[in-house]
Image: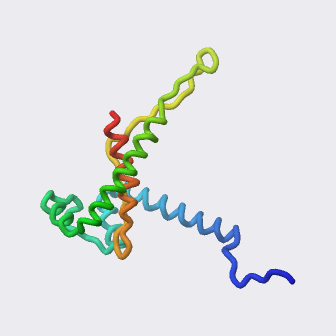
Amino acid sequence: MSIRYLKTGKSESDKESDNEKVVQIVSDTLKKIENEGDTAVRELAIKFDNYAPESFRLSQDDIDALIAKVSPEDMEDIRFANAQVTNFAKVQLASMTDVEVQTLPGVILGHKNIPVQSVGCYVPGGKFPMVASAHMSVATAKVQVYRV
């Protein structure tokens, strides 16, 4: 008796085609942001999240009001997750050391970890906000910044 599949996944060529489309969309999106700055970010926020604030920069009062809406249990979970990600990011950072070696006379090879001055992070909102995206992006970047 042979095996009969009721459903199969996408073919390799379909998956490859889908991946190429994703790469193109992401590349175009990043170019748009690079060329148009905040104007592009505003368009994308409206397109993806129907979000069009007067300013993307929150005041301390805005931040405090939003935090006040979070339950104590959720706040505890958020702090716990942030501590876990931050601690691991510190271990990762400690493992990444600068390297320089002369492999032949006059041939010097190596790498150097240089923190960036600023970073933008997309944290999905909407029906299913991904709080972990903020931890993984922001907390990790903050560990790198405070290294200097």
Give the image location of residue 14, x and y in percent: 66, 71
| Residue furthest out toward the top | 105
Give the quarter of the image for residue 73.
bottom left
Classify 81 as above or below 69: above
Q: Nearer the viewer, residue 14 or 74?
A: 74
Give the quarter of the image for residue 78.
bottom left
| Residue furthest out toward the left | 61
Q: Nearer the viewer, residue 99 or 24?
A: 99
| Residue furthest out toward the right | 1
Classify 122 as above or below 139: below
Q: Residue at x 20, y 69 (%)?
A: 69
Classify 101 as above or below 35: above
Left or right: 20 with respect to 30? Answer: right
Left or right: 15 with respect to 82? Answer: right
Q: Residue at x 71, y 85 (%)?
A: 6
Quick one: quadrant of the C terminus?
Answer: top left
Q: Nearer the viewer, residue 19 or 137?
A: 137
Give the image location of residue 42, x and y in percent: 30, 65
Q: Nearer the viewer, residue 61 or 132?
A: 132
Quick one: quadrant of the N terminus?
Answer: bottom right
The number of discs equals 0
Give the image location of residue 88, x and y in percent: 43, 46
Colour option used: rainbow
Q: Residue at x 53, y 65 (%)?
A: 22
Give the image location of residue 9, x and y in percent: 67, 75
Q: Residue at x 23, y 67 (%)?
A: 70
